[in-house]
Image (spheres, rainbow, N blue to C red):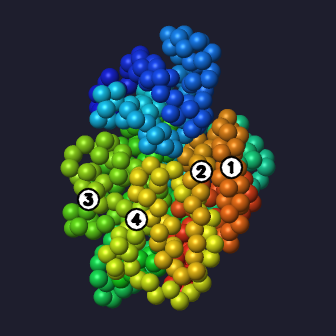
Amino acid sequence: MTFDFDDPKYYDVKAVEKELERVTELCDGCRRCYRLCTPFDFMLDDCVDKNDGDISKITSADYRKIVDLCWQCKLCFNHCPYTPPHKWNIDFPRLMLRAKAARAKHEGITLQDRALGDVDLVGTIGSATAPFSNWANSFPPHRAVMEKVLGIEKSRRLPTFHRRTFASWMTARGTKPSNPKTSVTLFYSCSVNYNEPQVGRDVVSVLEKNDCAVRCPEQVCCGMPFLDGGDIENARKNARRNVESLKAAAARGEKIVVPQPTCSYVLKNEYPLLVPGDDAKIVAAATMDIFEYLASRKAEGTLNTDFVGKPPGRVSYQMPCHLRAQNMGFKTRDVLQTVPGTTVSVIEKCTAMDGTWGMKKEYFPISMQFAKKAADEMEAAKPDVFSTDCSLSALQIEEASGKKPVHPIALLREAYGIPEEH
């Protein structure tokens, strides 16, 4: 399979379908991902088995539905025994991306995917007009229009916009430590910037408690929402802008820390493909999830363990798929359990959100089936608090349970006894 976005063959619809046929036949023979998620169940139950295993009877419409049902959790890649460099060379998530990209190239990008993909435009407008934008997003007639025009489920809970973005707060505040022992660069993510600025402020507080000067160079959305709609061109534009902005920090040897798992996954794994050359590889190598970074400090004995504040207690922690896909172990759990009196129950259940996929009317019911399973397992642990690193997983869990999970960085800030900054 080719992953060269500049190669016209990448967007060849017939070539993509031929590859889908090849992979379907191999998946039928393996079935390790059966019951893992909806795309594989549809592929094997409704396409393969109903045709008595005759792959040639699977239609183009069937393959299209397989692609549409994928929400890019990436977990099948970890399960698959045939990933590169295996001779069968299966990368199912990237095949789904390629299929969407080929479709977008030939059919155009839908209005729905354009609206959901341009997070910086939506976020800028939403934050500039807050709190009116939040009222509008809770006003049933407005939501009915959004559903009719953009296909965004009218009953879906939407992220809250904040008038003061994290970026504007950070610019006004500046860096605090007078004699930092090290410096890190923060890729704060669009969801933190527009919807969860307190998460960004908590990250800064915790890093500064650990003698870090925090830099925040100019940045845009990582580009994953564009990829969800097959919009390779705009995803690459964002990737190039971020690589250009972050490469100096990576060249200085600074770590690029990220508080949102999807963004750290994209910087590490997608940027070297989206932006060919050494710069993207250097940025990818320097990128760490925030708790991956804190766990490295713990391992080297430099993590501040002066916990004089409120311990988290019993934490029911949903580990986001895009952290699991990075194969780094349970870094968030390990750091939180450094706090005396803290126990963390890890819930490895997908919430089927993927940023844009779970927003869509046609997939909202499926996404909530998965979210409810995660929320029920979190509740079964009888915790003091729900927690997850992913703001959009938190949105799903709150939708399913009525309880809003907090980002684990907030639990760590509280354990240090640091008051919230505003």
> Disc number at residue 349?
2
First in sequence: mark 1 vs mark 3: 3
Pinpoint residue 344: horizontal percent, then vertical percent: 57, 68
Question: To which residue does mark 3 refer?
Answer: 247
Q: Is residue 196 above or below residue 368?
A: below
Compare residues 90 and 173 and report the one nearer the observer. 90
Residue type of the residue flagged with mark 4: Glu
Compare residues 275 and 59 and report the one nearer the observer. 59
Q: CA distance from mark 4 to mark 1?
A: 27 Å
Residue at the spot 53% in from the left edge and 22% down from the top edge = 63
Q: Is residue 308 above or below residue 296?
A: below
Labels 2, 3: front one: 2
Density class for disc 3 (Cα within 10 Å; few <14, some 14-19, many ≥20) is many
Residue type of the residue flagged with mark 1: Lys
Q: CA distance from mark 1 to mark 3?
A: 40 Å
First in sequence: mark 2 vs mark 4: 4
Residue type of the residue flagged with mark 2: Lys
Pinpoint residue 394: horizontal percent, then vertical percent: 62, 58
Question: To which residue does mark 4 refer?
Answer: 292
First in sequence: mark 4 vs mark 1: 4
Is the Cβ of the residue at disc 1 closer than 8 Å to that at disc 3? no
First in sequence: mark 3 vs mark 4: 3
Q: CA distance from mark 3 to mark 4?
A: 20 Å
Q: Secondary structure at mark 1?
A: helix
Compare residues 338 and 411 and report the one nearer the observer. 338
Question: To which residue does mark 1 refer?
Answer: 373
